[in-house]
Image: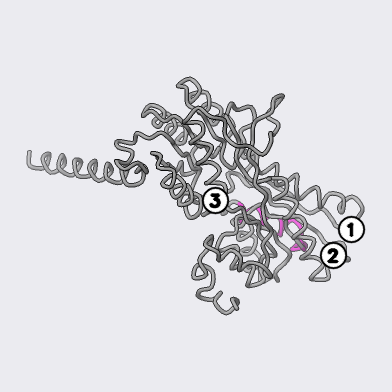
Amino acid sequence: MEGEIVKKLIVGLVIAAVGVLATVSGAGAKSTGAQGGNADICVLLPDPKTSVRWETQDRPALVAAFKTAKVSYVITNADGSAQKQKTQADQCLANGAKVVILVSLDKGSSIAIEAAARSRGAKVIEYDRQVIGGSAAIYISFDGKAVGVLQGKGVIAGLKALGTYSKKPVVAELHGGQTDNNSFLFKSGYESVLNPLYKNGTLKKGPQQFTPGWDNQKAGVIFEQMLVKTNNNIQGVAAANDGLANAVVVALKARKLKPIPLSGQDATPQGVQNIISGWQTMTVWKDTRKLATASAKAAIALLRGQKPAQTGTVANGSKRLPAFIIPPVSINKSNYKQLFNGYLKRSEVCRGAYAKFCN
């Protein structure tokens, strides 16, 4: 009997602790906050691992925008699970969310989330990643193809700087997750730069592969296999983001190979450290503060029954989807300090073994 009482007490304490954590992590921005998980706006982030930006950049930027606008919100993270994200969406809608800001994990679950929102009279903003065939009110993101173009140009610039551009270098491509429409936009961008050079013989097309779920560990295995397949004969890599690029760096270092031209994306502290230390050529900066601000404004407009601001439209199957598209910025060793304008802290980058590379 005593053991049962202790068990019940422990269970009660755990439930209470979970309730406190849920309230803190999902707190709204009204003066009373979003009590019990109820909020007008529900943000569905994808995961905390494939890129640190979701928790270190997007979440705080969204929180700041919502607080400024004085709207109630809940922000969740699906930990890479499409099923978990669908459950989180259903909970938000059951709690009365009127706008869902969705970072898609895969097409099927995202279309289901959008259909559930529509059935409850809620609007969906596709944030950063478009859902082809979806039914969102607006897509707010950066120019995905332009991101890829900057990546392709970065690899070419790196090859020229090393003097290997004229030696028919082998260039590999490490794409993002195949369930993410953005991966195809980035790919179309860097291949618009690289394919003509493969075709005319300036470059040699190396191994190319998508990375399941943008998983950095899987990217490392994939690139190791690329090195084995080519007997280390790879002189450049178009990597879709900083996490994948770091997997390349780790593999090169493990084999005691020299740095090669290498692209990235997201302007993460790790990506910038790889750039200033000479292991990564460039990254693409997508200022998530602009993305968050635009998304918050769109959410507020939708809450008020108004039409969100847009810069144009994008194809969505046979239809067109209203869109707000933000241009990306290329970052390399010559201009990385502009990130220290409040986007990154100098102390996040210029520390430990990397401090000596900052001047």
Question: Element type at marker 1?
Answer: loop
Q: In the image, which residues are magenta?
A: 219-235
> Looking at the image, is 276 positioned above or below residue 14?
below
Find residue 165 and name its label.
2
State yes or no: residue 233 in magenta.
yes
Left or right: where 322 falls relative to 149? left
Q: Quadrant of the C terminus?
A: bottom right
State yes or no: residue 218 in magenta.
no
Find residue 50 and name its label.
3
Label 2 CA crowd tier, 10 Å (few <14, some 14–19, many 20+): some
User: Tell me, what colour scheme is on the image?
Assistant: one colour
> Looking at the image, is 229 positioned above or below residue 97?
below
Q: In the rendered structure, which amino acid carries the disc numbered 3?
A: Thr
**Label 1 close to label 2 by CB (< 8 Å):** yes
Q: Where residue 98 appears, x then y in whole percent?
A: 44, 29
Find residue 305 and name its label.
none
According to the image, label 1 marks what residue? 202
Q: In the rendered structure, which amino acid carries the disc numbered 1?
A: Thr
- Magenta portion: prevailing SS class: helix
Q: Earlier in the sequence, mark 3 or mark 1?
A: 3
Question: Element type at marker 3?
Answer: loop
Question: Element type at marker 2?
Answer: helix
Pick whichever, 24 or 202, lies toward us.
24
Residue at the (50%, 27%) spot, across then down: 305
Left or right: where 226 falls relative to 351? right
**Label 3 – label 1 distance at C-alpha:** 33 Å
